[in-house]
């Protein structure tokens, strides 16, 4: 028979206490021997096993994820084109994402291809992208006479339709298209209508927004960004690129081609009365269309270089050098206030910062810091006929633009320098513009600048 151990025979532990003794009649032992508890425990173990097997089977059975290494979004405004992942998004959502610095009241009133040209341009053509004010719609006729390729133009209607004796800009456009076959064939019109709540604003409309819209909806791979000050492209830029395939290769790789800008001189109607009304020294029919004639007009004073203002400057184009230039010349000492008309790629190039009211120089400065080389075309140029009145910029807008641009210069330097460092390209040739132009800004922030 079983005899319980003698308590005196149990060896003491290190602490001086006896080791625990198993008690079969302990309450916990009774619970563990309970059939209900054992059933619950076995059910839990079975559930865990089944749960693990289910997830293992699901993981093994699922297909491999699809990776789109070279997936391009297709354009969605043409119903015959392939399906795009953005097809189900409303135009309001897409435009508000594209133009984040504009209010929804503006982006909801953008109507791309309000009038669509009847032609189908080739992808390798150069599209003229510009903005025409609603009071200067007659310039469309001048543009199609001077430029034979496709044109993407933005029209911004900002006056109330119930103004007494006011002709609707839409009716003017319709009449112009009906009477001029070149306008119907070449011009895509993208319409913006300002809501009534914004018509009393003291700040002018966003010029950089207009440039981005005209460029974005161009139907070719390359665009001529024409400054919206009344300038006309009097030479055939497309022909120049067709004659020199090397230029087109530079354009494909992300370089910028500059068209020097000139302006017709203004002379008083009465030469003996200095306060008399000023008129252009040349009418549009006599505007020079080749370099030889232009140089003659510059010598006799009827045509001059564009004004060197903070908003529009060509100080990077040396006239004495350009007059005898027969090949491309690279701009060396870049000026952050440089804002010429340029030919660039439509895609894979930075867009104009829309925080500014009308600062084209900010567009060019961003392109320069990103590594684009600026090449001055030897024979192509633009001429401002002087028929459009100078846009009056309020003191408030001047102050806003000046303060924004001072900070923008520093911000752009730091942004592009950080991008080059992150990509391991700080010492590359592509980053040399950022290294040279932003030495002072980057030195203040403690970065080591190497002389190029």
Image (cartoon, rainbow, N blue to C red):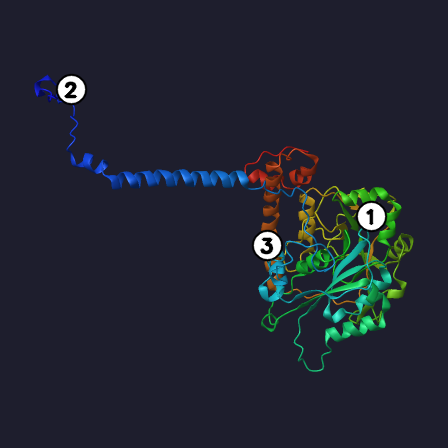
Along the polypeptide, which appears first: circle 1 or circle 2? 2
Neighbourhood count class around disc 1 (C-alpha, 10 Å): few under 14, some 14–19, many 20 upward: many
Q: Nearer the viewer, residue 244 or 10?
A: 10
Which-is-in-front pick, marks 1 and 2?
2
Mark 1 touching mark 3, by CB under 8 A? no
Could you tell me how far apart the alpha carbons at marks 1 and 2 are, in whole angstroms?
Answer: 99 Å
**185 versus 434 height, above or below:** below
Residue 126 appears in view: yes
Instruction: Note whether 193 is above or below 17 in the view shown.
Output: below
* Residue located beneath label 2 in the image: 13
- The quarter of the rendered structure image containing the N terminus is top left
Left or right? Give the position of 143 relative to 166.
right
Residue holding disc 1: 377
Looking at the image, can residue 203 be seen? no
At a point 73% along the width and 70% down the height, the residue shown is: 134
- Please tell me which residue is depicted at 59% across the width and 42% down the height of the picture: 65
In the rendered image, which quarter is residue 248 located in? top right
Q: Is 175 or 228 nearer to us in this picture?
A: 175
Label 2 sits on a secondary structure element that is loop
Left or right: residue 42 versus residue 361 is left
Mark toward the start of the polypeptide (2 vs 3): 2
Residue 404: which disc? 3
Q: Quadrant of residue 46?
A: top left
Query: Image point 82% across, 67% down: which residue?
Result: 184
Callout 3 secondary element:
helix
Label 2 crowding class (10 Å Cα cut-off): few <14, some 14-19, many 20+? Answer: few
**Quarter of the figure with residue 177:** bottom right
Disc 1 to disc 3, how far (Cα)? 31 Å
On the rendered structure, is 31 left or right of 75?
left
């Amino acid at each position: 028979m079983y005899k319980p151990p003698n308590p005196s025979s149990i060896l003491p532990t290190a602490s001086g206490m006896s080791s625990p003794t198993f008690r079969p009649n302990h309450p916990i032992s009774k619970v563990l021997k309970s059939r209900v508890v054992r059933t619950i425990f076995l059910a839990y173990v079975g559930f865990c096993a089944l749960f693990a097997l289910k997830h293992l089977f699901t993981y093994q059975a699922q297909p491999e994820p699809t990776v789109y290494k070279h997936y391009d979004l297709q354009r969605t405004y043409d119903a015959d084109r392939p399906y795009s992942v953005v097809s189900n998004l409303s135009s309001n959502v897409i435009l508000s994402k594209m133009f984040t610095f504009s209010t929804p009241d503006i982006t909801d009133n953008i109507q791309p291809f309000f009038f669509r040209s009847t032609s189908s341009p080739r992808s390798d053509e150069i599209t003229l992208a510009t903005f025409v004010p609603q009071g200067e719609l007659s310039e469309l006729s001048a543009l199609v006479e001077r430029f034979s390729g496709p044109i993407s133009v933005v029209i911004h209607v900002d006056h109330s339709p119930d103004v007494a004796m006011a002709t609707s800009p839409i009716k003017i456009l319709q009449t112009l298209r009906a009477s001029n076959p070149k306008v119907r064939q070449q011009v895509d019109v993208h319409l913006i209508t300002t809501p009534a709540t914004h018509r009393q604003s003291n700040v002018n409309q966003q010029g950089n927004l207009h440039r981005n819209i005209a460029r974005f909806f161009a139907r070719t791979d390359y665009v001529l960004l024409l400054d919206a000050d009344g300038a006309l492209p009097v030479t055939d830029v497309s022909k120049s690129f067709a004659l020199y395939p090397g230029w087109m290769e530079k354009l494909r790789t992300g370089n910028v081609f500059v068209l020097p800008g000139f302006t017709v001189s203004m002379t008083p109607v009465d030469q003996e009365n200095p306060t008399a009304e000023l008129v252009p020294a040349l009418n549009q029919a006599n505007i020079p269309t080749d370099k030889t004639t232009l140089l003659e007009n510059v010598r006799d004073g009827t045509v001059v270089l564009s004004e060197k203002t903070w908003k529009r400057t060509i100080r990077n184009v040396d006239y004495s050098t350009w007059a005898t230039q027969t090949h491309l010349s690279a701009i060396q000492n870049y000026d952050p206030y440089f804002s010429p008309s340029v030919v660039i790629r439509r895609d894979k190039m930075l867009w104009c910062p829309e925080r500014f009211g009308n600062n084209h120089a900010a567009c060019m400065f961003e392109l320069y810091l990103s590594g684009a080389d600026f090449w001055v075309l030897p024979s192509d140029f633009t001429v401002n006929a002087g028929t459009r009145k100078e846009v009056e910029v309020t003191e408030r807008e001047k102050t806003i633009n000046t303060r924004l641009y001072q900070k923008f210069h520093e911000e752009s330097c730091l942004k592009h320098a950080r991008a080059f460092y992150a990509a391991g390209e700080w010492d590359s040739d592509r980053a040399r513009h950022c290294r040279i132009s932003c030495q002072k800004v980057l030195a203040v922030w403690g970065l080591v600048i190497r002389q190029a």
